[in-house]
Image (cartoon, rainbow, N blue to C red):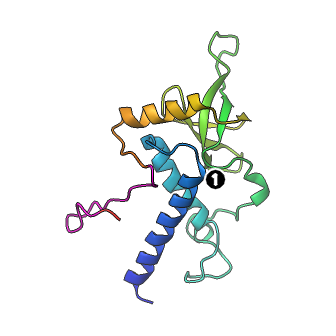
């Protein structure tokens, strides 16, 4: 199998996985930039965590070979991508009037040994990190906040799934 065919299969796999995750979430219209980038990072981290049948090793994952990461323990993945949580924030000093929790959307595990996850804050739309949270059901207010963040960032509407565009000049304008 030549490199071009392998890269096409890999891109197709990324598109399929992103469409599957997108269709399982209630945020269907306009995703914020942090959520879109987080989705691709989550898919790449997941794909690199397991050995590939066309890779260098059938025993070691790409993440283990390149970064020296240990294999993922599936029991430690407790929060799926796109879950709504109240994230506990660590305030210093602890007796301030700042809120102790913030509403956030899960962007997946960070990959460190402490069990930290990436989140998108629903107050700022930016990426935050956290170790403790309380999972809650997704309400219409959360869906509306996500759509508003996406619209304010001029992100495209995606009712049928993510939109993939090429950045190279030879393919510009074609959507796949």
Q: Position of residue 136 (x, y in %)?
A: 71, 34
172 part of magenta stretch: yes
Q: Position of residue 105 (x, y in %)?
A: 59, 38
| Above-or-below relation of 165 to 110 | below
Q: Residue at horizontal 50%, vertical 35%?
A: 146
The kind of secondary structure element at disc 1 is loop
Q: Position of residue 70 (x, y in %)?
A: 69, 63
Q: Residue at horizontal 65%, vertical 82%?
A: 58
Q: Looking at this rendering, what residue extends furthest in the bottom direction?
A: 1
Q: If the image is split into quadrants, where does the N terminus sit? A: bottom left
Q: Image check: 100 left or right of 26? A: right
Front one among 139 and 8:
139
Front one among 130 and 138:
138
Name the residue tied to disc 1. Answer: 111
Residue 90: quadrant of the picture: top right
Q: Position of residue 157 (x, y in %)?
A: 39, 45
| Above-or-below relation of 48 to 27 | below
| Above-or-below relation of 50 to 175 | below
105 part of magenta stretch: no
Q: Examine the residues drawn in magenta and state their main secondary structure.
A: loop
Residue 66: quadrant of the picture: bottom right
Q: Give the residues drawn in magenta, as a range.
A: 159-174
**How many discs appear?**
1
Q: Residue at horizontal 76%, vertical 53%?
A: 76
Q: Residues within 10 Å of mark 1 (few under 14, many from 20)?
A: some
Q: Residue at horizontal 64%, vertical 44%?
A: 117
């Amino acid at each position: 199998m030549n490199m071009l065919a392998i890269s096409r299969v890999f891109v197709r796999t990324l598109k399929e996985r992103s469409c599957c995750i997108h269709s399982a979430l209630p945020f269907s219209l306009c995703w914020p930039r942090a959520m879109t980038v987080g989705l691709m990072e989550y898919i790449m981290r997941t794909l690199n965590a397991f050995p590939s049948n066309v890779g260098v090793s059938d025993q070691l994952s790409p993440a283990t070979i390149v970064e020296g990461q240990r294999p993922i323990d599936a029991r430690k993945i407790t929060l799926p991508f796109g879950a709504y949580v109240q994230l506990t924030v660590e305030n210093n000093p602890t007796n301030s009037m700042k809120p102790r929790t913030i509403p956030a959307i899960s962007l997946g595990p960070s990959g460190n040994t402490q069990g930290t996850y990436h989140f998108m804050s629903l107050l700022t739309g930016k990426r935050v990190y956290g170790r403790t949270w309380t999972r809650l059901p997704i309400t219409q207010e959360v869906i509306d906040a996500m759509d508003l963040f996406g619209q304010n960032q001029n992100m495209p509407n995606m009712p049928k799934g993510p939109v993939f565009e090429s950045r190279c000049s030879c393919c510009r304008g074609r959507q796949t």
